[in-house]
Image (cartoon, helix red, strand yellow):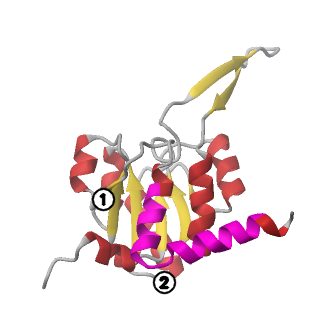
Amino acid sequence: MPKLSHAARARKIKLLLFDADGVLTDGKIYLFPVPSEGQHRIVVEAKGFSAHDGAGISLARLGGLKTGLITRRNSETVALRARDLKLEYVYQGSTDKLKAFREILHKEGLTASEAAFVGDDVIDLPPMQNCGLSIAVANARREVKKSAHYVTPHAGGEGALRDAIEYILKAQGKWKQAVENYVGESTLGN
């Protein structure tokens, strides 16, 4: 059986899943202690997200892709961003990312070859090694890049997810129409 090219793999994708820290963000976690009364100290978490990735998620939706994240950490900041982006799937606290990946496939009625996964670190390798199109961000760990079918030109938190979406939609011939629809949505309210 011939090995599929990366573009051929991308043409089959219907679901795009990704990690949060290091993909949707630059991987930095800012913790700020907040003065409080009593013994319990409150800590506020902050992360930065790329507007390019947010636009990319909208373009993915317009191109017919479903999206979701699978992350090991639990973060209200990530939950807020996921709600803002209207992601179909948000799995936080997932120590077994492959199990979460397979659960989402089952819910969608898709095969692994119809899903892509974007990662940056070794915990992302199990879903990356079991999906149709594995994508590493530009600043991913060496082992992750080595396992990827495609490496984004941008780093995590700097538009890497947008790169992945653009790559898939262009391979599917849906990019131009998705952009036209996105721009059309933006001008409807003006």
Regarding residue 63, the answer to whether it shows in the image is no
- The numbered disc on residue 98 is none
Answer with the quarter of the image where residue 185 lies: bottom right
- How many C-alpha atoms fall within 10 Å of the one at disc 2: few (<14), some, or many (≥20)? few
From the image, tell me which residue sits under label 2: 109
Sequence-earlier tag: 1 or 2 = 2
Identify the residue at image location x=68%, y=62%. 86
Point 50% across, 71% down: residue: 104
The residues colored magenta run 163-186
Q: Position of residue 190 (x, y in %)?
A: 86, 63
Across and down, in percent, residue 186 comes to 75, 64
Q: Residue furthest right?
A: 190
Query: Image check: 43 left or right of 115?
Result: right
* Crowd class of label 1 (few under 14; some 14 to 19; many from 20; radius 10 Å): many
State how far apart marks 1 and 2 are (Cα): 25 Å
**Number of the label disc, if any, that sits on residue 150:** 1
Residue 155, x across and y down, in percent: 42, 42
One can see residue 110 in this view = yes
Q: Quadrant of residue 45?
A: top right
- Does residue 157 sit above or below 59 in this rendering? above
